[in-house]
Amino acid sequence: MPAQQDPYCFKCRQYPSAGDKLRKCAGCRAVRFCSVACQAADWPQHKLVCRSFGAARTQALLPLMAAVVRGNEAAVRALLQEGANADGALDDGRTPLITAAQKGYVAVTSLLLDAGARVDRAMLNGCTALFMAAEGGHEPVLAVLLRAGAEPDKAYKDVRTPLCQAAQEQHVAVVRALIKAGADVSKTGDNGVTPLFLAAANGNTAVISALLEAGADASTVTIGDGRPGDGEPVTALIIASQSGRDAAVAMLLEAGAEADWALPDGRTALFLAAQEGRVSIVLRLIGAGAKVDTEYNTGSTPLLQAAQNEHEAVVAVLLGAGADVNKTNSVNGCTALFIAAITGNLAVVNALLEAGAMVDKAENGGLSPLFMAADHGDMAVLMALLKAGARVDKTSHDGQTPITFAMDAGHQGIAAALRRWKAGERC
């Protein structure tokens, strides 16, 4: 059995107030202090024995740790019978029980618990045996730990619970076992990430289903882990839409996720799906009532973004859903046709023209789509615009014309074609 610990501070000999806990020295783990101040004040004397005591303690634990790492049940049993400390820890706080759980050794885990290992004892970083079992997908070990009283919501580094980790690693059986044991499906750590958010990012429908069935809120706003923006509010629907998780998007919408919820910068799930070319998700979101012309704070819309990224199918879907073909970027005045003329995507240009795009609508500098086709030397787009009625003689605010743009860019063939068209020659 481990030695009885004094219930008072090793330095000031005072007992802790109700609700307070003594701090164990991380070096020797043999004495406790009531505060950092007491520990610092005692360090000149304590350091003389701390390191050697800690080293001796670690050395005594090594045979048991080695047997646990190998999963040698007979050796573990023998060492425990000889007095090995089942609840001992290495310098980082790792215990034989935490190691057995990480390895997935059911019998060894049971032996250590029977010998007095504390089920919720954590490493210095906060990692427990239950967290390790959840991370590794070791459901049989998890079951043993839960029966022994492991706290299902104890978080690693106060950031991630076992349920969050199981959802992240897509361990469906572990997720269900934790939920059955009472794990809070909405509990987050300091970073605000929920199990549902992590499952949505991975697109694991079985995990998403288990969480939703247990009462997870599909519209919960969490704090992202780098996608789509570090530290910004985000929802499971946003991350699933951006990541192309079609089935996850369908499940979240069915569960009541808000289709038009926007990030702080104005991007919605539809905007992100359009930006990434996720046609099926765009269709789902539109079917759920998502607004097709919502603006991002840069002035862009789903249609403008799809045109810029040359997602022809998404452009067609958005136009079919009633997106305003002539809506301009509120910052620079560009239309989808203007953007398509820059990218040179003839299919997108034709789709926009067929939908009624204004061929001569200029951006804030007075440049029309024809200027862009001339500047980029794109004959196919140039001819499509001319045939749709684009004016060759249109001038920008600074007096430029499509012909001067072509000449300045070195596209003599384009300039010649524009002159011929201006002269009435149609080819």
Image: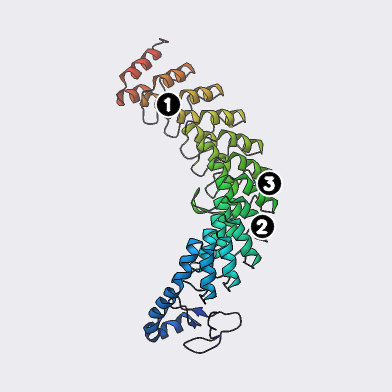
Q: Which mark is residue 78?
A: none
Q: Are marks 3 and 1 in contact (CB under 8 Å)?
A: no
The span from disc 2 to disc 3 (Cα, nearest Å) is 21 Å
Label 3 to label 1, Cα distance in Å?
40 Å
Up the image or down, 7 lies above or below 378; here it is below
Residue ID at (61%, 50%) = 172
| Badge nearest the viewer, 1 or 2 | 2
Evaluate whether residue 401 shows in this view. Answer: no
Q: Secondary structure at mark 3?
A: loop
For mark 3, does the 10 Å Cα neighbourhood hold few (<14), some (14 to 19), or many (20 or more) residues?
A: few
Task: Name the quadrant of the N terminus.
Answer: bottom right
Q: Secondary structure at mark 1?
A: loop
User: What is the number of the mark on residue 179?
Assistant: 2
Residue 223 in the image: state x and y as whole percent: 54, 55
- Based on the displayed image, in which of its 4 quarters is residue 324 positioned? top right
Q: Quadrant of the C terminus?
A: top left
Q: Position of residue 418 (x, y in %)?
A: 38, 17
Residue 216 x, y percent position in the rendering: 66, 53
Which mark lies nearer to you, 3 or 1? Answer: 3
Mark 1 lies on residue: 344
The residue drawn where x is 60% and y is 66% is 110
Determine which quarter of the picture holds residue 294.
top right
Answer with mark 1 or mark 2, whichever residue precedes in sequence: 2
The image shows a total of numbered marks equal to: 3
The mark nearer the N terminus, 3 or 1, is 3
Question: How many C-alpha atoms fall within 10 Å of the one at disc 1: few (<14), some, or many (≥20)?
Answer: many
Q: Describe the element under mark 2 as helix, strand or loop.
A: helix
What amino acid type should be assigned to the residue bearing mark 3? Answer: Gly
Q: Is residue 220 left or right of residue 50?
A: right
Marked residue nearer the N-terminal end (2 or 3): 2
Tag 2: residue type? Ile
- Residue marked by disc 3: 256
